[in-house]
Image (cartoon, rainbow, N blue to C red):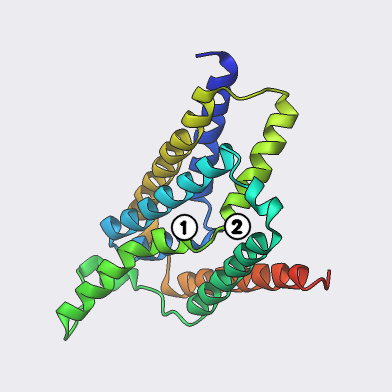
Amino acid sequence: MNPETLGLLALAIALGTASAMMPLGPVTVLVFRRALGRDYGGAFKIGLGRVVAESSYCALAVFGVTALFERVPIIRLGAETLGSVVFVLLGIWLLTQTPPSTASAAAGPPADPDDLRAARRRRWGSWSGLIIAALNPTLILTWSAGIAIALTTLEIEPTLAAKIGFPLALACGLTCGYLILIGSLRRWGEKLGDKLIRWILRGLGTVFLIMAAVNGARLLGWT
């Protein structure tokens, strides 16, 4: 394997790790919230859903599937519109959430009069990472742009091994990032007060709404 391919794989791992640890994406925010509620297994399952979806979109971008977006502009418009809707819904959800109490969670799981219903919510939550990432097809546009910029800057032509390995390396990086994030929250999450958690959730919800508004204004030609 040549040094250029190794460099691209190392870049993919680094990007995936950093992306998973920064709570600026919808799935990472859900992982963050679930981990603060001490449901570490559920948090990791949510993260794995994003790993599957985003690495798949990255693979499509690497192999040039985005050419379809250039030939059929309505597909790109639909993808970007759907991505904005996802951000609006998640932003509203975060603004209306009650933060999981780290103090009560430390004593054990909260009592629920309907255990079956709670179990169903947890199972649905485990799929949320995959669903949200899959419903955000703008990821393929983001990866296409990023890969194009990287290849132009480095002035290299990726080999078949690099094209196959890049999405796999990204998946490894994302997985490692979520393991580090969840491990950190497991160790230090209890030191965060409920008031601080509430402000974090509301702040992130506001960020998502602003991002959706900016993208919507661009799609409508207002900017």
Which residue is at a point 40% across and 60% down the rendered structure image? 129
Name the front one of labels 1 and 2: 2
User: Are the residues at dot 1 and dot 2 in contact (C-beta closer than 8 Å)?
Assistant: no
Q: Is residue 23 left or right of residue 212?
A: left
Image quadrant in which you'd find residue 194: bottom left
Which one is nearer the viewer's eye here, 204 or 80? 80
Query: Quick check: 203 above or below 23?
Result: below
Which residue is at a point 53% across and 44% down the rendered structure image? 60
Which one is nearer the viewer's eye here, 120 or 96? 120
**Tag 2: amino acid:** Thr
Residue 8 numbered tag: none
Q: Residues within 10 Å of mark 2 (few under 14, many from 20)?
A: many
Q: Is residue 183 left or right of residue 28?
A: left
- Secondary structure under tag 1 reads helix
**Tag 1: amino acid:** Thr
Query: Quick check: 97 above or below 83?
Result: below
Q: Is residue 64 left or right of residue 100?
A: right
Which one is nearer the viewer's eye here, 92 or 55? 55
Q: Residue furthest bottom?
A: 113
Tell me where residue 121 appears, x and y as whole percent. 27, 74
Which residue is at a point 50% across and 63% down the rendered structure image? 26
Query: Quick check: 93 above or below 137?
Result: below
Query: Quick check: 71 above or below 170?
Result: below
- Residue linked to disc 2: 138
Tell me where residue 54 appears, x and y as whole percent. 48, 49
Distance between the Cα atoms at labels 1 and 2?
A: 17 Å
- Secondary structure under tag 2 reads helix
Mark toward the start of the polypeptide (1 vs 2): 1
- Residue linked to disc 1: 28
Tell me where residue 3 appears, x and y as whole percent. 57, 15
Q: Is residue 170 left or right of residue 220?
A: left
